[in-house]
Image (cartoon, rainbow, N blue to C red):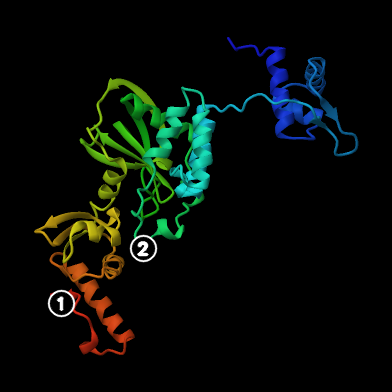
C-alpha cells in the first residue's frame, strides 16, 4: 500500500521548493509536489498560518518567495547528496583532500557537522581519493589539471554511496558491469560479476572500484561509470590488511597491456618515483643505486616519451617495441638539436630492435 504524505510534510516540501526556486508559481509548485494548483495554494496557506513569511510577488513573472525574518533550520544532507557534493568538489579541485587547502578546509567543516550515519561515508570518499603530496609527476595530468572526464564518465552519487557503504561493511556485491565498446561496433555487452569491494578511488577525475572478482578469481579495477547496478549479497569478507588503495590501483593500471616494459634506471626508487607516477609501473630496487621498472603498455611511442623525462641514464632491457620507440625518439631529438652525436649526453644505452 502506498504511503500517504501528510499535509504537514507536503507543506515542508513546499517550503523547500520556494527556498530553492524564489518566484515559483502556484502551478509550478503543484507540479513539484504532485498536486493541483489549488492544493499548492493551500500548503502555502499552512506555512503562513505557522508564522512563516511567504511573500507573493505580483506581475507576469510573480510567484512565491521567502520573506525577510525567516530563520532557516540547520542545513541537512542525505547520504547521496553529501557524497555527490564531495565527489563534485574533488573532481574540480583535487587539493580539496587536504584540510590545509582553502577549499579542503571548507569541505572538512562540512564533513564535521554531518550526522553520524553520513559523515564516515563522505569522509572515506575524501580520504581514499587523496593523492599524496608530490605524487604527481612534473607535467602530468594531475599537475596541470587537464584531467576532466567526458560527460559519459560521470557517476551516480547514489551508486557510489552504495559501493562505499559495501566497502566499509565488508559485504560482497553482485554487479552488472558494462564492458568497453568493441572496435567492430558491436553492442556493448553487460557482464554479471560477484566482487568483494575493497575501495572506491578517484584518480585523474575518474572513479574506480578496486575489488576482488569471484567471477574471475582475480583482483580487478572497475570503472564506476560502467557499473550498471550493485546488489548486496549475504556474504561478508575481510579486505587485505594494510591496503593502500590508491597505490594498488595505480600499480594495477600499469599492468596487463600488450607490450612488456622492463627498464633498468641508474637511480634509487625514491628518486625515480618523483619523475614517474605509479601508474607507469612498479619500481623495484636493484642493488643500492638502481631501479628496475616493470610494466606494460599498448603505446610504446607514448611510453618512450615518458621515459625521456628521466634525468638519469637508463637501459631498455625488454620489449623490442619499446626499444624501437626509444631509438626513434632519440633520433628525432638529435635532429631537433642539429644532429650532432658528439653533443648527445650518454643517458640511454640504445640497442636497435632486430
Q: Which residue is mark 1?
A: 352
Quadrant of the image containing the C terminus: bottom left
Query: For mark 1, does the 10 Å Cα neighbourhood hold few (<14), some (14 to 19), or many (20 or more) residues?
Result: few
Residue 320 is situated, as x and y percent measured from the top left of the image, at 16, 68
Of residues 122 and 152, the one nearer the viewer is 122
Residue 140 is situated, as x and y percent measured from the top left of the image, at 38, 60
Residue 348 is situated, as x and y percent measured from the top left of the image, at 19, 74
Could you tell me which residue is drawn at 36 percent across and 44 percent down? 179
| In the displayed structure image, the side of residue 329 where residue 264 appears, left or right | left
What SS does tag 2 mark?
loop
- Upstream in the sequence, badge 1 or badge 2? 2
Distance Cα–Cα, label 1 vs label 2:
29 Å
Q: Residue furthest left?
A: 287
Could you tell me which residue is drawn at 26 percent across and 47 percent down? 252
| In the displayed structure image, the side of residue 129 where residue 90 appears, left or right | right
Which image quadrant for residue 341? bottom left
Up the image or down, 221 lies above or below 215; here it is below
The answer to whether residue 191 is seen in the rendering is no
Query: For mark 2, does the 10 Å Cα neighbourhood hold few (<14), some (14 to 19), or many (20 or more) residues?
Result: some
Disc on res. 138: 2
Amino acid at each position: 500500500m502506498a504511503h500517504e504524505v501528510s499535509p504537514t510534510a507536503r507543506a515542508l516540501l513546499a517550503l523547500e521548493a520556494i527556498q530553492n526556486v524564489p518566484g515559483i508559481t502556484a502551478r509550478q509548485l503543484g507540479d513539484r509536489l504532485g498536486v493541483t494548483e489549488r492544493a499548492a495554494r493551500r500548503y502555502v496557506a499552512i506555512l503562513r498560518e505557522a508564522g512563516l513569511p511567504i511573500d507573493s510577488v505580483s506581475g507576469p513573472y510573480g510567484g512565491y518567495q521567502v520573506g525577510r525574518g525567516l530563520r532557516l533550520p540547520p542545513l541537512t544532507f542525505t547520504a547521496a547528496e553529501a557524497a555527490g557534493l564531495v565527489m563534485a568538489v574533488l573532481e574540480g579541485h583535487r587539493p580539496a583532500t587536504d584540510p590545509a587547502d582553502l577549499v579542503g578546509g571548507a569541505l572538512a567543516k562540512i564533513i564535521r557537522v554531518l550526522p553520524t550515519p553520513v559523515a564516515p561515508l563522505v569522509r572515506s570518499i575524501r580520504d581514499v581519493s587523496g593523492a599524496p603530496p608530490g605524487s604527481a609527476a612534473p607535467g602530468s595530468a594531475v599537475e596541470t589539471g587537464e584531467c576532466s572526464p567526458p560527460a559519459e564518465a560521470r557517476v551516480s552519487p547514489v551508486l557510489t554511496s552504495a559501493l562505499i557503504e559495501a566497502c566499509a561493511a565488508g559485504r560482497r556485491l553482485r554487479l552488472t558491469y558494462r564492458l568497453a565498446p568493441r572496435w567492430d561496433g558491436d553492442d556493448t555487452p553487460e557482464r554479471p560479476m560477484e566482487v568483494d569491494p575493497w575501495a572506491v578511488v578517484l584518480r585523474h577525475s575518474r572513479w574506480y572500484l578496486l575489488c576482488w572478482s569471484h567471477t574471475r578469481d582475480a583482483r580487478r579495477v572497475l570503472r564506476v561509470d560502467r557499473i550498471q547496478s550493485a546488489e548486496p549479497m549475504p556474504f561478508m569478507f575481510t579486505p587485505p590488511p594494510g591496503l593502500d588503495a590508491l597505490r594498488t590501483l595505480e600499480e594495477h593500471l600499469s599492468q596487463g597491456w600488450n607490450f612488456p616494459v622492463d627498464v633498468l634506471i641508474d637511480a634509487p626508487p625514491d628518486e625515480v618515483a618523483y619523475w614517474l607516477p605509479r601508474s607507469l609501473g612498479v619500481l623495484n630496487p636493484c642493488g643500492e643505486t638502481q631501479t628496475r621498472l616493470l610494466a606494460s603498455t599498448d603505446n610504446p611511442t607514448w611510453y618512450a616519451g615518458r621515459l625521456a623525462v628521466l634525468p638519469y641514464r637508463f637501459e631498455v632491457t625488454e620489449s623490442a617495441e619499446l626499444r624501437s620507440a626509444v631509438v626513434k625518439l632519440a633520433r628525432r631529438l638529435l635532429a631537433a638539436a642539429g644532429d650532432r652525436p658528439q653533443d648527445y649526453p650518454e643517458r640511454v644505452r640504445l640497442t636497435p630492435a632486430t
